[in-house]
Image (cartoon, rainbow, N blue to C red):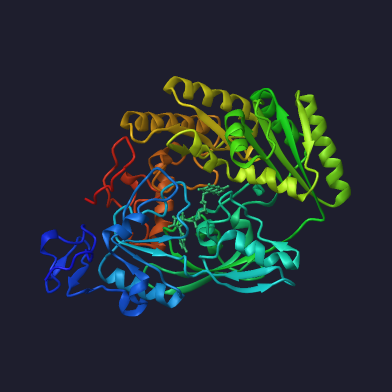
Amino acid sequence: MRRSGLQPSARCLVKKEAIAFEAHEECSFGIRLKGERYGFWPSDFLGSSSVLFQAEDVVLYEYDGSVEKGRPDIVVFPTTTQEVSQIVKLTGKHNAPIVGRGAGTGLSGGALARTGGVMIVFARMNRILSLDPQNQRAVVQPGVVNFDLSLAAAPHGLYFAPDPSSQKSCTIGGNVAENAGGPHTLAYGVTTNHVTALELVLPDGEVVRVGSAQGDAPGYDLTGILVGSEGTLALVTEITVKLSRKPEAVETLLAIFDSVDDAAETVVDVTARAIIPAACEMLDGWTLRVVEDFVHAGFPRDSAAVLLLEVEGLAEAVAAQARAIREVSNAHHAREVRLARDNAERELLWKGRKNAFGALGRLAPSNYVLDGVIPRTKLPQTLRRIRQIGARYGFDICNIFHAGDGNLHPIVLYDPRDRGQFEHAMQASAEIIRYCVEVGGALTGEHGIGMEKSELMPLLFSDADFDLMRRVHDAFNPACLLNPGKIFPLSKGCGEIRTRSSAPSHSRPSAT
Ligand SMILES: Cc1cc2nc3c(=O)[nH]c(=O)nc-3n(C[C@H](O)[C@H](O)[C@H](O)COP(=O)(O)OP(=O)(O)OC[C@H]3O[C@@H](n4cnc5c(N)ncnc54)[C@H](O)[C@@H]3O)c2cc1C
């Protein structure tokens, strides 16, 4: 008997036409179809509304915010640590790869099922388990949306400091895995500076805890190792975070420039004078115009670049810092320096910044958001080089980035329907990232390596470096079932996947 619409992942079925529910079929990692059930059928303990396996459902999980793709065979939505552990034990028995997923906003392909397998989506583990204002701590499940924690903490005068521009949708589990940053990283540090303890499910299903709620835990800093490990060492099922106290005063400034170089020199000079703004973001003219059309935040359409700077702290210090920033900006020929008059104006300026990636959708069918780091002093020359690379390949490349940290996000606008354009976009992007490394920078500031940049890792690391990383990886994830094909170049990784061709996959790479 055939039942239309109930078609498990094509990859799992050897013979598609033989979908008979009495049949036994085995897929590459041993999932077995028997009647309406897989031998591995997690709905036995999850409930069928927590499992997706039909092609038209799982296809929605083959994307994240990157240009990569990788389709899972099964997608599951646990609600407790216990369920995560059960799923992991079950998949382990069948040697199936597992990948964790938060909101799928990642920009390096981290949450994609590169070799198929089971995707564990943490969206339903979204409870704030406790909030302790006196000790400035919260314990959350990994699927809590970043901004929701700050909203919950606000009545106590507290907030969660890591603020990626995606904070209204990304999850704290995803932030932990990527060691996410954001505009306010400059003053407050990245996610790792705000996480004190984790509960983890290891690849064999065992549940362990690392770190401690209040302070430094004795022994190795395993929390430090786990944060930023991109879901390759363990699944995070509970997170203890620090909450920060809202500052007494905040001033937001918009410095407007007729030249990108002047804006870049201002960033170098502001930080050289030991002024540490809480945030120092730059948007170039291309971006400004499209953002203004979208949010009507009052960005000047005819300028070459703006800096969005924020200073916060005690009222007197804030006023002095705002004055100093104005002076430095003027010294670098700022056309105007505006001070946000009230909270509404401040929020509008930030709305413009935080929605900029989305607004760029008006300019081209697709865009590729890069993430590289350079020493701040190299900002002017790097921005010039990005313009040259764009011109050589015939692309418009916009720049919206965390200038104070030297964390660049050039955005290559392209049409993915044109294969040639797509390949050139990838080549231009790789050139930009290589240049970042050449001037003393790094491959990523906050988006992670994932499957996007794994092949570029040898630009920074030697074989001995990789060996050490592999030993750490194998101590947690020896069978490489957890998020395979990420971080390590394929020749130095688990050896389970073939190297992709020069253009990133728009279809799933096959396992060897
Ligand atoms: C418009 C836009 C703006 C952005 N701005 C910023 C920014 O300013 N700063 C910044 O740092 N990033 C930014 N990002 C990137 C992205 O939002 C962050 O990397 C974020 O931390 C990803 O969270 P997520 O919940 O979407 O995770 P996903 O994309 O779902 O997953 C990311 C990684 O985390 C792993 N993972 C997820 N949950 C778990 C878990 N519970 N246990 C183990 N591993 C897990 C996945 O396997 C994957 O490797 C932006 C993205 C977009 C689309």
Q: Is residue 370 visible?
A: no
Instruction: Tell me the quarter of the picture where residue 6 sits.
Output: bottom left
In the image, taking residue 44 as reference, residue 236 lies left or right, namely right
Q: Residue 52 or 227: which is nearer the viewer? A: 52
Residue 162 image position (x, y, % from top left) = 62, 54
Instruction: Tell me the quarter of the picture where residue 280 sits.
Output: top right
Residue 144 image position (x, y, % from top left) = 55, 65
Q: Looking at the image, which residue sits at the far bottom?
A: 45
Looking at the image, residue 178 lies above or below residue 2: above
Q: Residue 476 or 9: which is nearer the viewer? A: 9
Looking at the image, residue 44 lies above or below residue 255: below
Q: Is residue 388 visible?
A: yes
Q: Residue 10 or 482: which is nearer the viewer? A: 10
Looking at the image, residue 247 lies above or below residue 93: above
Looking at the image, residue 184 lies above or below residue 116: above
Residue 453 image position (x, y, % from top left) = 42, 42
Q: Residue 366 or 102: which is nearer the viewer? A: 366
